[in-house]
Image (cartoon, rainbow, N blue to C red):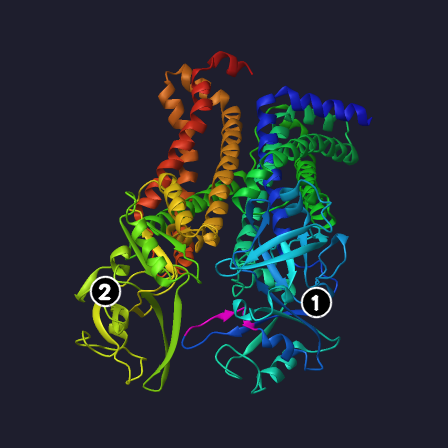
């Protein structure tokens, strides 16, 4: 009997190919998005869960300083040894960044993400070893399989001797031997590295290059981390950045490190917890909409066959036979959709990984956790459609079925409206996020965005660096060049001081006489010219903070009275770090010998400028690697999480709108089929195509309008909530809703137009006979 049931299901599947295709496409899109998101979100949530001792491993963060809030994942090097004095600590490990590391292979230098660790690294963390010894030893280096393959074309590199260079200006050069090959862990980690070296490699008087780093502790069994930290924070001699005993510490489980906002060191990768929650919500919405479409469209398909069902009931079809027929037909649709979704998932996974900076592999879905969720989703969906189909068929009177009396699917209107409510809300969110990201990218930051920074060698003479700056000014594409301590977005300094008994802090920059000109800072009063060591520029926020009525000539706050440091000019506020923080007080000091070079390229083509800069660099510093960073790129990196959020919401809005259109198409198809005779009679009495079109679209228009009215306040609230993370932001204007509503109207007209036009042009006699 089962082959007959399957044959019958396939016959129904192919009889209405277009309708069946809509069901399959809706499910395929839903399944593909669900598989991708489930695998990605589980992989993210399981970060650092592969360490056997994960329940006892903790990362340490310290409190901020001065009036700055937040926590930092950075402690002095002495903290590592100091922690081992406590009996509650079984082991401790410090991880430090090797600045600007690169390895030399022949004449070629390749940048490498190398971290320096102590000998306890592998006793705490369980990164898999492919070859060699599972220990970081002095004079040795461990490299990942991926990087070994990339650099040497093979993973068989044990015992190979290479030169590694690092430090703030790559001034430290060592010869090391590859002692181990580290494989890719089963789950991802917040620690990101291409190579591991021992702390001892850069010792011997060079410790100032890495005074500290991230610290981790392995607590003994049955140790309460809260009680231990309380005890540690009461120790007046504990090492801190501000001095012994002046900062508090907190322990964070290693499984939370990936979501810790304090982890901003170069070798760390993080993801916001909010992003994960948004991902699960989006996954749920897409799955719900795709599942609803399948259930609704499947029931409508059954309704189309009511004569056949009525005859079956008259002949005495049993409950078991009804269940089996529904299960077989549902399996056909879901089975085809699963196969197609697997193909679609495999095809779009590289794009997905690239967009979300992820590394999920297709095989990850075969693991127990994601596989169990995916199978459970399919099973629940099948159960729902089988039960609803069976109930609907068993409750309907056979005679009414054979008379072709239509039976409407009562809940379709509600869920149809809900589908478009979700889609419109996501569209409103997408448009607003695009607007905010455009604002971040193009709006004024108070200084020149067209700045490129190069770091001159620290051990070069000041005169030589000044000569190099003058050489840069001879390049046609360079408009200004200045020596500086850093730039407003990255590499800036924060100084802490006491003013009238209150601890305060300020951003501090040092630059030569061209600093303000290169950044194009806007003068409020005084002068922009810095000529003497004691000359200072301050911004409007500092003047306002200290309520300075006539700041020109005043002594700079926080500077000892014995030093003659006076304000010579006030500049307009400019963005420091990002638009997510208030503009802080800023002090700009004169320093002719600053090592960083800020180059104003005036928006010229960097592909033309960079070779010229590299040529000039080679002329002056042939022994040093040419390196640079673009300030605009640095600024946009501050919004990496927002950028990912934007991509997820945009993709979700497009996906849900596509699924909603599938539902709209199918529902309109069902309505047209059920009202075919009515429309034919109207056409016989003279109704034109326009009348029929209006008749069919008015009911859908009402539901779409209702969905839009409900989505407007929800979208407005959600976007205002998201925008609170920005201090400087756009407003959620009315044109956002007008644009979204217009786009919805166009989509609905196109989706409905084809079917309604076909119905209005069909032969009335044919429909009346049916």
- Helix, strand or loop for disc 1: loop
Name the residue rendered at 24%, 63% in the picture. 572
Name the residue rendered at 40%, 27% in the picture. 695
- Write down the residue under mark 1: 119
State the count of labels: 2
Q: In which quarter of the image is the N terminus?
A: top right
> Does any portion of residue 405 appear in the rendered image?
no
Closer to us: mark 1 or mark 2? 1
Mark positioned earlier in the residue sequence (1 or 2):
1
Q: 414 or 535, which is in the foreground?
A: 535
Asked if the magenta segment contains residue 39, the reply would be no
Residue 287 higher or lower than 621, as above or below: above
Asked if the magenta segment contains residue 69, the reply would be yes
Q: How far across and down, in percent of the image, does residue 37 sit?
A: 60, 46
Q: How far across and down, in percent of the image, does residue 29 sit?
A: 58, 36
Hey, which residue is sitting farthest right in the picture? 1
Q: 207 or 632, which is in the foreground?
A: 207
- Helix, strand or loop for disc 2: strand
Name the residue rendered at 24%, 79% in the picture. 555
- Write down the residue under mark 2: 571
Q: 3 or 558, which is in the foreground?
A: 558
Q: Quadrant of the C terminus?
A: top right
Q: How far across and down, in percent of the image, does residue 374 sit?
A: 68, 44
Bounds of the magenta span? 68-76
Residue 21 higher or lower than 527, as above or below: above
In the visual, does 429 lie left or right of 583?
A: right
Query: In the image, which disc is placed on residue 382?
Result: none
């Amino acid at each position: 009997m089962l082959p007959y049931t399957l044959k019958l299901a396939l016959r129904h599947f192919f009889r209405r190919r277009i309708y069946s295709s809509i069901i399959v496409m809706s499910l395929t899109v839903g399944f593909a998005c669900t598989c991708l998101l489930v695998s990605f979100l589980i992989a993210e949530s399981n970060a650092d869960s592969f360490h056997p001792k994960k329940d006892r491993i903790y990362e340490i963060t310290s409190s901020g300083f001065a009036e700055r809030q937040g926590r930092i994942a950075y402690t002095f090097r002495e903290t590592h040894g100091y922690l081992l004095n406590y009996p509650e600590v079984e082991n401790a490990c410090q991880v430090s960044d090797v600045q600007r590391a690169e390895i030399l292979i022949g004449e070629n230098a390749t940048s490498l993400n190398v971290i320096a660790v102590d000998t306890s690294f592998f006793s705490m963390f369980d990164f898999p070893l492919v070859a060699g010894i599972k220990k970081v030893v002095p004079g040795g280096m461990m490299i990942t399989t991926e990087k070994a393959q990339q650099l040497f074309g093979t993973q068989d590199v044990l015992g190979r001797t290479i030169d590694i260079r690092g430090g703030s200006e790559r001034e430290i050069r060592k010869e090391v031997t590859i002692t181990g090959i580290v494989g890719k862990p089963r789950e991802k980690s917040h620690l990101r590295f291409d190579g591991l070296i021992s702390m001892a490699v850069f010792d011997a008087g060079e410790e100032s290059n890495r005074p500290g780093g991230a610290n981790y502790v392995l607590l003994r069994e049955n140790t309460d981390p809260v009680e231990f930290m309380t005890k540690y924070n009461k120790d007046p001699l504990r090492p801190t950045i501000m001095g012994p005993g002046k900062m508090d510490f907190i322990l964070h489980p290693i499984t939370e490190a990936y979501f810790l906002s304090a982890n901003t060191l170069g070798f760390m990768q993080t993801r916001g917890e909010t992003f994960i929650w948004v991902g699960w919500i989006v996954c749920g919405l897409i799955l719900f909409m795709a599942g609803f479409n399948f259930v609704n469209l499947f029931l409508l398909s059954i309704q189309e066959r009511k004569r056949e069902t009525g005859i079956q009931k008259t002949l005495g079809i049993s409950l078991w036979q009804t269940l089996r027929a529904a299960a077989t037909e549902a399996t056909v649709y879901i089975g085809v959709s699963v196969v197609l979704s697997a193909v679609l998932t495999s095809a779009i996974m590289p794009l997905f990984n690239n967009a979300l900076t992820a590394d999920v592999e297709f095989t990850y879905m075969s693991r127990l956790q994601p596989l169990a969720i995916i199978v459970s989703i399919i099973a629940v969906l099948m159960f729902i459609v089988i039960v609803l189909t069976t109930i609907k068929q068993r409750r309907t009177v056979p005679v009414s079925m054979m008379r072709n009396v239509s039976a409407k699917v009562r809940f379709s209107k509600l869920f149809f409206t809900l589908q478009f409510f979700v889609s419109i809300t996501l569209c409103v969110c997408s448009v607003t996020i695009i607007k905010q990201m455009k604002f971040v990218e193009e709006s004024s930051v108070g200084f020149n965005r067209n700045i490129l920074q190069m770091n001159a060698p620290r051990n070069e003479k000041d005169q030589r660096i000044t000569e190099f700056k003058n050489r840069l000014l001879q390049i046609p594409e360079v408009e200004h060049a200045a020596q500086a301590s850093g730039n407003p977005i990255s590499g800036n300094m924060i100084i802490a001081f006491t003013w009238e008994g209150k601890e305060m802090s300020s951003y501090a920059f040092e630059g030569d006489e061209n600093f303000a000109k290169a950044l194009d800072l806007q003068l409020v009063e005084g002068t922009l010219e810095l000529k003497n060591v004691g000359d200072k520029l301050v911004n409007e926020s500092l003047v306002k903070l200290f309520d300075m009525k006539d700041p020109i000539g005043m002594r700079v706050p926080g500077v000892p009275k014995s030093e003659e440091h006076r304000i010579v000019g006030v500049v307009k506020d400019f963005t420091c770090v990002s638009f997510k923080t208030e503009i802080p007080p800023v002090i700009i000091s004169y320093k002719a010998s600053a090592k960083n070079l800020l180059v104003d390229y005036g928006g010229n083509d960097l592909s033309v400028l960079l070779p010229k800069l590299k040529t000039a660099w080679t002329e002056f510093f042939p022994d040093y690697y040419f390196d640079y960073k673009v300030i605009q790129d640095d600024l946009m990196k501050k919004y990496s999480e927002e950028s990912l959020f934007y991509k997820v919401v945009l993709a979700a809005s497009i996906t849900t709108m596509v699924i909603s259109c599938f539902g709209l198409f199918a529902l309109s198809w069902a309505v047209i089929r059920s009202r075919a005779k009515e429309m034919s009679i109207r056409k016989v009495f003279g109704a034109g195509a326009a009348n029929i079109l209006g008749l069919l679209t008015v009911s859908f228009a009402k539901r779409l309008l209702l969905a839009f009215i409900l989505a407007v306040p929800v979208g407005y609230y959600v976007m205002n909530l998201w925008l609170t993370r920005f201090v400087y932001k756009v407003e959620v204007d009315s044109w956002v809703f007008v644009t979204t509503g217009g786009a919805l109207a166009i989509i609905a007209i196109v989706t409905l137009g084809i079917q309604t036009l076909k119905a209005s042009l069909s032969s009335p006699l044919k429909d009346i006979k049916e």
